[in-house]
Amino acid sequence: MKLKYLNFIRGVSINRIGKTGMALTTSSFLTFVLLELLRIMGVFTNAYIGLITYLLLPTLFIIGLALIPFAWMIYKKDAGKTTRELLERQFDRNDLAESKLGASLLRTVMIFTIINILFLLVASMRTLSFMDEPEFCGTACHSVMNPEWTTYQASPHSRVACVECHVGEGTGALISSKLNGAWQMVSATFNLYERPIPTPVRQLRPARETCEKCHWPDKFYGSLLKSIAHYEMDEKSTPKYTTLVLKIDTGEEVGRAGIHWHIGKGNDVRYTSVDDKREEIIWVESKQRDGSFKRFTNKKLEGINYSTDSVRDMDCVDCHNRATHIYEEPRNAIDIRMRKGLIDKSLPYIKRESLGAITASFTENDKAAEIIKNRITSFYRRNYPDLLASKGKAIDKSIETLQEIYKRNIHVGMNIDWNAYPNHLGHSREGGCFRCHNESMIDDKGNSIRYDCTLCHSILAYDSEEPFKYLKPFGSADKDSAMHVYLKDEFLKSFN
C-alpha cells in the first residue's frame, strides 16, 4: 500500500517535540508561500513584512526540521529499542515493504527532503534579494537608520541601491557584508551602537568600483558655470550672488589642470590623517613625472605618529564624502528653498526669522514643528499683522518648508544636530579643500601647496548684488553689453 503523506506526518510526530517541529515546519512553509504571493501581487510591500517572510519564517522552518530528528533521538533513548522496531511501531508494514522502487517510506523521505532543500534555496535567494533593497536598509532598523534613509531619499543618488556603494563584488564581499549586517542587527537589538553613527570611511569600497561605474574620469573636462545666491538678514532678505566658473579638468591637457586633477591618470595623490579620520591631514604626497613622490607636511601637526595602514590613495570620496547622505548647513538650506520659491522672499525678514526658527532648539520633530510655527506666526502677528491675511498662504507654506528642513536634518534620537557630519566638498567650515591646500602644508624647501582662489575656479562675482560683476565680455567692462545683459537675465530667471 502506498504510503500516505498524512500518515508520514503522523508517523514522525512521535512526541510533543516532534509535533512542535512538524507544526513549525508546516505552518512556516505555508505562511511563507502565502506572504510571498501577496508581495508579488503588491499587496504587502512593508519592510517589516519582508523581515517576517524572509528572515523569521525560514528560521522557524529550519528549527522545526531540527526538532523532528531530535524528537526521534529522545524517543529512541526512552524506548530502548532499535530504529527498525520503532519504525514498525509508527508505520504500517505496507509502508515499510520493499518494492521495485525501494521502500515507500524512503521515497517519501526523499520527496520531503527535496521539497525542503528547494524551499530553503528559494527562501535564501529571496532573502538576499530582499536585503539588497534600499527599503530594507532604510526601514528595517527604523530608529537607527532613519536619518540615513531620510537623507538618501532626497539625495542625487536616490535611485542607486545602497548595495552598489556599500557592498563589494564577489562572494567574499557578499559574505563580509552579511556578517557585518548580522552584527548591526545585534547592535540594534542590544543598543550597542554609537550615536550618531560614525561615517564608515574605512569600510567604503574604492571609488573605482562605485563612483566610476557611472562617472567617467576621462570625461571630466572643460568648465562649469555655477551660480549661488545667499540672502541677507535684512528686511528685504537682499540676495547676494557668487558666480564661479569651475575648472573641472583632470589635467590630461597641458595647462588645463582643474579640480579633478587629483584623480587624473598619472596624478597619484596619497596622504595620511590624524586618527585616520581624513579631517586633519598630517602630510600629502603627489607623484612627479619621474615617478617619485613629493611630500608636503603639515607644520602644525609635525611629530604626530601615524600607522602605515592609514596611508590612503586619494579618490572621489575624499572630497565628495557626503555624495548621498547629505546633511545640510542651516543657512544654505534656507537659501536653496528661497531660491526655489518654497520660502517667499517677499516676506519681511524671512531669512533672519527662518534661521532663528530652525536653530532655536534641539528637540523632537513634533515639538520643533510647533516651535517653528509659533515663532514665525508670532513674529508676523506682532510686527506685520496685515500680512497674516494678505500673505497667509505664503507664510504657511514657508512654515511647512522650515519644518521639512528641520525634519530632514535633525534627528534627536541619534544625536544628529546641525553639522554633525562634516562635508569636505568645497570651502566648508570643517575644512574641505583647505585640509590640504593651506599655507601650513609645506615641502622640504618651505614651499606650500597652492591655495589661491583661481586654482580651481574663476570668480565672476563674489557676494555681490550683481551676479556677473567681474565679467568683461569681449574685452570690455561695459555692463550694458549684449552678452552681459543676456547672461544676467538668464541667470536671474532661475532665482525668480
Image (spheres, rainbow, N blue to C red):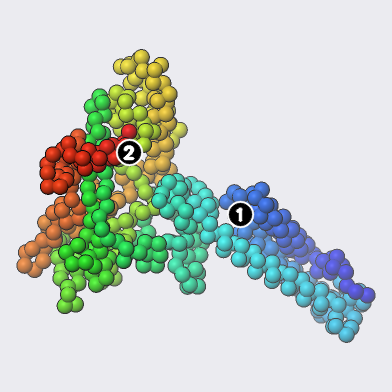
Callout 2: few (<14), some (14-19), or many (20+) C-alpha neighbours within 10 Å?
A: few
Write the residue at 21% across / 42% down: 483
Q: Amino acid at mark 1?
A: Gly
Give me the disc on residue 50: 1
Earlier sequence position, callout 1 versus callout 2: 1
Callout 1: few (<14), some (14-19), or many (20+) C-alpha neighbours within 10 Å?
A: many
Tag 1, which secondary structure?
Answer: helix
Residue 5: in sight, yes or no?
Answer: yes
Q: What residue occupies the far left of the structure in this picture? A: 445
Rendered location of residue 363, percent (x, y):
39, 35
Please name whichever residue, 122 or 466, is drawn nearer the observer in this view of the structure: 466
Tag 2, which secondary structure?
Answer: loop
Please name whichever residue, 61 or 463, is drawn nearer the observer in this view of the structure: 463
Vertical arrangement, residue 284 with respect to residue 378, above or below? below
Rendered location of residue 26, percent (x, y):
75, 61
Q: Amino acid at mark 2?
A: Ser
Vertical arrangement, residue 299 with respect to residue 117, above or below? above
Please name whichever residue, 386 or 21, is drawn nearer the observer in this view of the structure: 386
Rendered location of residue 463, percent (x, y):
19, 39
Q: Are marks 1 and 2 in contact (CB under 8 Å)?
A: no
Write the residue at 63% across / 54% down: 52
Q: What residue occupies the far front of the structure in this picture? A: 482
The answer for how far apart the CA atoms under marks 1 and 2 are is 43 Å
Q: Which residue is mark 2?
A: 494
Front disc: 1 or 2: 2
